[in-house]
Image: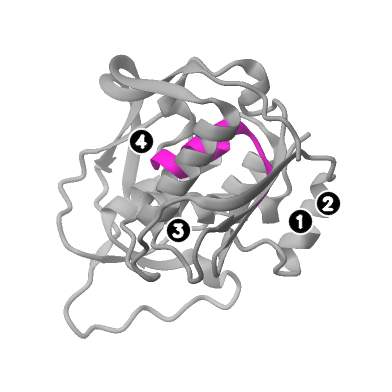
Amino acid sequence: MQRGVGWTLALVFVKLLAAQKGTGGSVRSSGSFQAASIKRSRSSDADSWRRVASREVQGISGNLFRAPLVTVTDLIEMAYAVKEYEIAGAPRWASTGGEKFDVVARADTPGKPADAELRSMIKQLLSDRFRLSLHSEMRETAVYELLPDSKGIKLKEVRPGSKMERRAPENPLATRRSSIEVLVSILSNFVDRPIVDLTGLTAEQYDYRLDLQEAVAEKRAGGLPSAIFSSVREDLGLVLRPAKRPIRVLVVDHVERPSEN
């Protein structure tokens, strides 16, 4: 069963938060969940999207963490700030297209945990409830190199005090401001291999327009990525070039189905 666009974007958002440095939340003395419910998901994709739309699902709200309709590899991605293609050795039932779970867990103290602590808590949850053990190693693998297009880069460096370009009313989410690192994280959600930044762009932030509507629809349909390549070239003046490079991957040594509670 494929996820709907809304849940796809919600999960992408949670993973992007996990991939960035934690800046919010109070400092915590303990990094664990006081109680956690993990059950095989029986929700339909439409049910999950309705819960996202109604704000029932927020990832982390206060000290309550919700992750409906997730696989084990989804949780590994959140906990270790990696993409699916940086995980190897997971059994089929634990991977994309495998068994999905509804996870609800409450931290042991009040207040929203910082992002780094939330990752640590999810790691502990994976260890305690899924008996997950893994190790990292370097592997030669297929990647995409992000390079400037011959026609010129369209990203604009943000100058101190400059205002963001006015958003287009027909697609307001296409107008963005971010670092290259965040841009690479966004693009990585729509391709099937790691992206290596070779743009040479080093400014703190850039303004750009990036229309992801076709890429999101394509991801929802479960097909191979294609729309993102034209969007990157036409909107950003960059290209994604296939190549092979050694990258660090997480190798799953052991994982078990959790007992429901």
Mark before the other along the chain sequence, 1 or 3: 1
Q: Are marks 1 and 2 in contact (CB under 8 Å)?
A: yes
Q: What is the magenta range? A: 67-81
Report how far apart the C-alphas of labels 1 and 3 lie in the structure.
24 Å
Q: Is 64 within the magenta?
A: no
Q: Is 70 within the magenta?
A: yes
Report how far apart the C-alphas of labels 2 and 3 lie in the structure.
27 Å
Q: Return the residue nearer the eye: 195 or 56.
A: 56
Residue 254 visible in the snapshot: yes
Q: Position of residue 244 (x, y in %)?
A: 29, 18
Which numbered circle lies on residue 210?
3
Query: Of the residues shown, which amino acid type is indicated by label 4?
Result: Leu
Query: Magenta part mainly helix, strand or loop?
Result: helix
Query: Of the residues shown, which amino acid type is indicated by label 1?
Result: Trp
On the image, numbered disc 2 is attached to which residue?
46
Residue 231 visible in the snapshot: no
Mark before the other along the chain sequence, 2 or 3: 2
Mark before the other along the chain sequence, 4 or 1: 1
Quadrant of the frame with the N terminus? top right
Q: Secondary structure at mark 2?
A: helix
Mark before the other along the chain sequence, 4 or 2: 2
On the image, numbered disc 4 is attached to which residue?
240
Image quadrant where residue 117 sits? bottom left
